[in-house]
Image: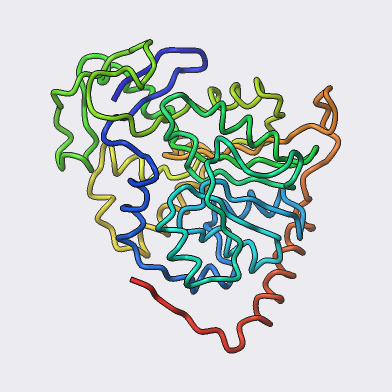
Amino acid sequence: MVWQAGDHGGRLAFFSGCTDAAYWDIVWRDLGLSYRRSRRGHLPYQLRSTFLRWVAPGGRVLEAGCGLAHFTVAARARGFAAEGVDWAPETLGRIRALLPDVPLRLADVRRLDCPDASYDAVYSPGVCEHFAEGPEQILAETYRVLKPGGIAIVSTPCLNEYLRRRRHLYENGSVLPYEATGKGERSTDPVTSASEPASEAPWNDFYQYAFTPEGMSAILRGLGFEVVDVRLHGTLLTLATWSFPWLGRLPGWLGRLLGFTVDSLPVLRRWGASCIWVARRPLSVTGVSLIPPLNEGAAADQEKRATTMIGEQRGGEREVDLR
């Protein structure tokens, strides 16, 4: 890991392996394709509330870096005109064979093959942190393909307050997370406050960045977006990874319940392992906000309509697993 100094708390760079298209094909190959919950419109709670609040019903939505495309499938089940792009050809082929009606394209999120102002919303699900040159090109392309007033939802690992308070550990020698070593021991890998680009680091291949909430917000504003919401989640993962490994061994249902409870407390949510930024392409160059978010009643109505529609679609549904 490398702590890269900079404005807004800098960023943390991880080095473990190259994340090119071939890497992701291998990662997704080991996972079975099951879309039972996605076909019913299931979205993770931390994404569902944000997505339904900011994206109007029926809008055209792009999942940029869709992986297994669970979001794309769920959004379509909720009535959105959702489609996905990814650069892992084998993975897309497997999904197309199972779900031929879901629109998926092979594309690089840094150079999307679509006209300007094509989408009402773009979701970037933990993608832009995996490029050593930084997220700017991906986010600029996101801005280009959004309609004026369109919404970008960007998710990445978070360099949160919990980790920033432990900065001295990284500056004096690497302390690997418990999930990597099983006991939180020191590593021989160098960890510094390096100012050089991650791609020039002399050990292993670049894997990903973790951004501070302020740092990514500044990048988005610099590209012309207005940042309208920032939300951290996954505090339990932070604690299990860096301090209390036994939390990662809880039964699945208990871990989910405890994670949801912890994330609902603002004082603890600031330690979230991930962060979701909601950014809007302004309607005008002034960046004045002219489109309010959906109010709570409208979001609830959208949820009710989606539930009704999904219920009507369930008849005769058959789950298929491809392993």
Q: Position of residue 167 (x, y in %)?
A: 32, 19
Depth check: give the residue in front, 23 or 13: 23
Along the horizontal axis of the image, is 166 left or right of 270? left
Q: Quadrant of residue 160?
A: top left
Residue at the outermost bottom position:
316
Residue at x 29% of width, y 41% of height? 241
Residue at x 33% of width, y 13% of height? 193
Looking at the picture, the colour scheme in use is rainbow
Rendered view: 322 above or below 210: below
Residue at x 65% of width, y 20% of height? 222
Q: Quadrant of residue 317?
A: bottom right
Q: Position of residue 37 (x, y in %)?
A: 51, 71
Q: Split into 4 quadrants, where in the image is the N terminus?
A: top left
Depth check: give the residue in front, 269 or 159: 159
Depth check: give the residue in front, 112 or 201: 112
Along the horizontal axis of the image, is 169 left or right of 157? left
Q: Position of residue 45 (x, y in %)?
A: 54, 56
Q: Split into 4 quadrants, where in the image is the C terminus?
A: bottom left
Q: Position of residue 203 (x, y in %)?
A: 22, 23
Residue at x 37% of width, y 65% of height? 253
Residue at the outermost top position:
195
